[in-house]
Image: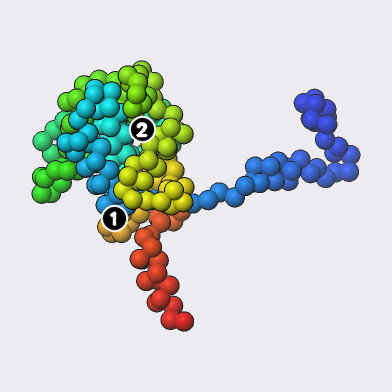
Amino acid sequence: YVSQLNSWGVDFSSGVSGAPSRAAKRSFRHPTRKVQGLEPWMVLYILQIYVFAEQRLGSQDWLDWSLTVGICIGVGYKLLLRHNDLSKLRWDDGWCDIFPTHVRFYIDGRKNSKYMGSFLDIAIPASGRAPSVYHAAVLGKRHFKSGLVMRRCSRFKVPDTSKYLGRDRFVNFLRAALISLGASLEDVGMFAARSLRVGGATAAAIGKLSQHDIAQLAEVKDQNWLDWYDSRTLERRLEISRALGC
């Protein structure tokens, strides 16, 4: 009766329906592949090239594009943000505030807290020295003053401050940044928008942060979430492999 009412055309007369299994086969036709996470040295080099390097100074369009790409990569990594989270960050007062000890972003709802806002803090390094994500965010606040952090931008067009940068274009810019660091075309194919979140979670785990602290930063309820996102470096994986002894 339910299938007829919804015009599904599924035969339930035998008492067994193949609809759920067929739907599962369609949904999981392609296996989900873990992406490669960014490492701290990658983020640091991207900040140096895109945000702090003197050679980036040129036309206003080029400067806006360079700052946007570099800062988004740094902030996304530091705060374990999804692309959807990055698209909501703003430079406006009240949405981004600068303090001597930290930069505070306010985000209006995330995936697991759709009806609540969150304060996201980026601390100044213990040494207080640049370059760091903190100093990049301070520079971005002073330069842009308002509008979206991940604003739609191009190296050849005036940025649109009212629209955010799409996922595909952001991933292309991320991969281009990695190529500028010396990565090959084959290697950059392993990086995606989740690479910021994966890399930040991995660095936090290596830094001996508790699963509770990492889950709180990522705003996830399941603390086992880290088991999926923690992608140890190649050196560490080889060390673990050698420890098996044969």
The colour scheme used to paint the residues is rainbow
Is label 2 in a helix, a strand or a loop? Answer: helix
The answer to whether 136 is drawn above or below residue 63 in the figure is: below
Q: Position of residue 47 (x, y in %)?
A: 24, 41
Is label 1 in a helix, a strand or a loop? Answer: loop
Q: Residues within 10 Å of mark 2 (few under 14, many from 20)?
A: many
Q: In the rendered image, which quarter contains the N terminus?
A: top right
**Res. 147 in view:** yes
Q: Position of residue 156 (x, y in %)?
A: 34, 24
Q: Position of residue 64 (x, y in %)?
A: 27, 26
- At horizontal 40% and vertical 55% (from top left) the residue drawn is 230
Q: Are marks 1 and 2 in contact (CB under 8 Å)?
A: no
Q: Residues within 10 Å of mark 1 (few under 14, many from 20)?
A: few
Report the amino acid beneath label 1: Leu
The picture quadrant where one finds residue 150 is: top left
**Is residue 133 shown left or right of residue 194?**
left
The answer to whether 115 is drawn above or below residue 208 in the figure is: above
- At horizontal 28% and vertical 23% (from top left) the residue drawn is 61
**Is residue 18 shown left or right of residue 152?**
right
In the rendered image, the residue lying farthest to the right is 13
Report the amino acid beneath label 2: Leu
- In the depicted view, which residue is nearer to us: 101 or 221? 101
The residue indicated by pointer 1 is 209
Q: Which mark is residue 86?
A: 2
